[in-house]
Amino acid sequence: MKVLMIYAREFAYEPTVKTLPDFPDVTEGRAYREVQVVCVQVEAEDQENLKSKETKLVKLIKWAAKKNDTKRILLHSFAHLSESKAPPSISKSVFDAVETRLRQSGYETDQTPFGYFLDLRLDAPGKSSARIFKSL
């Protein structure tokens, strides 16, 4: 699993191209303030120990959110962080499980539309904790 986290003062998206027909249609974008954006690529080899990877991801997100003093989390599928890709249904199940666990811990959590290319708008501060990359 590859994870790129960017703390954003402002983050917004607009759906542009749907790439996975089996996922819901989305026509409207959203905007967020003071949010920890978590870009994740679930890799094929992650399927062997998904629960462990989910737990590591949740802990990493909580750590980053604390460093950036936010309780807002936005999960974003970023299928270009690695050449290895888990099937979309597996990746989406990880996103849903992580979102549920974060909400149960008191975080405001959302996901960008799964299976879409998005126009993005990002305003991120220039501090070391605003950009974090990890391989889990």
Image: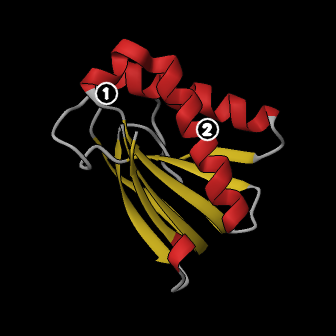
Distance (Cα) linking label 2 and label 1: 28 Å
Q: Secondary structure at mark 1?
A: loop
Coordinates of residue 123 in the picture (x, y in percent):
52, 80
Image quadrant assignment for residue 96: top right
Q: Residue at x 45, y 19 (%)?
A: 50
Regarding residue 128, the answer to whether it shows in the image is yes
* Relative vertical location of residue 32 with respect to residue 43 in this rendering, above or below: below
Label 2 crowd (10 A; few <14 / some 14-19 / many >=20): some
Give the quadrant of the C terminus: top left
SS assignment at label 2: helix
Q: Is residue 73 left or right of residue 43?
A: right
Q: Which residue is outermost to the top?
A: 48
Residue 30 can be seen, yes or no: no
Q: Is residue 120 above or below residue 20?
A: below
Q: Amino acid at mark 2?
A: Val
Q: What amino acid is found at the position of numbered circle 1 in the picture?
A: Pro
Q: What residue is pinned by disc 1? A: 21
Q: Which mark is residue 58?
A: 2
User: Residue 83: image x %, image y %?
Assistant: 15, 40
Residue at 77 percent across and 46 percent down: it is: 107
Q: Quadrant of residue 46?
A: top left
Q: Nearer the viewer, mark 2 or mark 1?
A: 2
Dot 2 or dot 1: first in sequence order is 1
Q: Residue furthest bottom?
A: 126
Horizontally, residue 6 falls left or right of residue 87, namely right
Q: Residue at x 54, y 72 (%)?
A: 130
